[in-house]
Image: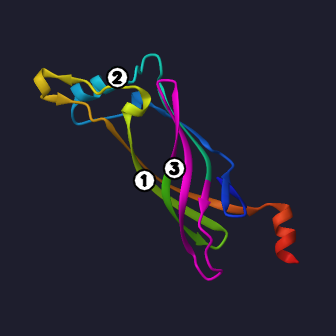
Amino acid sequence: MTATQNQNKLYLSQNQLAIQVKNFSSDNPMALRDFKKLIKADVYPSIKAQLNYVETLPANEKDLYSKGSAYVNITITGITHQYSIPVSSNKHGEYISIVGAKKINIRDFGLEPPVEMLGLIKVSEWISIDFRMVCKLTFNVNESIAQNK
C-alpha cells in the first residue's frame, strides 16, 4: 500500500480491514465458541478496523526511526471506538515500516465476558492488537514544491 505524508501525519491508500470471525482459531474450542457467541458472529461476521492516520513525532533529518500514534477505529458488534495505538516507524529509502500494539477491552463495546462451568472456562476480556505495515511513501504535491524551495 502507499502512504501520503502531510506534515507529521501519514494517510494510507487502503485504510480499512475486515477480520472474518470464522477464521479465528483457538486451542480451546469451547472458549472460541463462547467468544463467537459473545460477539454475535452470526449477525456481525467481521471485526472492522479503520486506520484514520498515523502521527509521528518530529524527527531529525538523520533519524530513520520515529515514535508516534496510530488513530484507529475498531468496530465490534456494530459499536465503534477510536483508539490511539503507540507505534514506531522506520524509514528505508522510499519505504516506511510501522509497528504497533495495544490491548483493548471488550467491555468498551458493551460486552461482558462469559464464564462457563463454574469459572473453569473463561473468555478473556482483552483483545490484543498487533500489526506491522510496510508502505511506499509518496509526498503531497504542494509539500514537495515547498520542500524544493
- What residue is pinned by disc 2? 38
The image position of residue 60, as x and y in percent, is 62, 79
Q: Quote the CA–CA distance across marks 1 and 2.
A: 23 Å
**Rendered image quadrant of residue 10:** bottom right
Mark toward the start of the polypeptide (1 vs 2): 2
- SS class, disc 2: helix
Identity, as a three-letter code, of the amino acid under mark 1: Ala
Q: Quote the CA–CA distance across marks 3 and 1.
A: 10 Å
Q: Which residues are magenta?
A: 54-83
In the image: residue 117, left or right of residue 103? left
Identity, as a three-letter code, of the amino acid under mark 3: Ser
Q: Which mark is residue 84?
A: 3
What is the crowding at mark 2: few (fewer than 14 residues within 10 Å), some, or many (at least 20)?
some
CB atoms of marks 1 and 2 within 8 Å: no
Name the residue located 17 percent from the left edge and 28 percent from the top edge: 121
24 w.r.t. 104: above or below: above
Q: Nearer the viewer, residue 73 or 20?
A: 73
Q: Per the image, is 57 magenta? A: yes
Name the residue located 20 percent from the left edge and 30 percent from the top edge: 122
- SS class, disc 3: strand
Q: Quote the CA–CA distance across marks 3 and 2.
A: 25 Å
48 w.r.t. 4: above or below: above
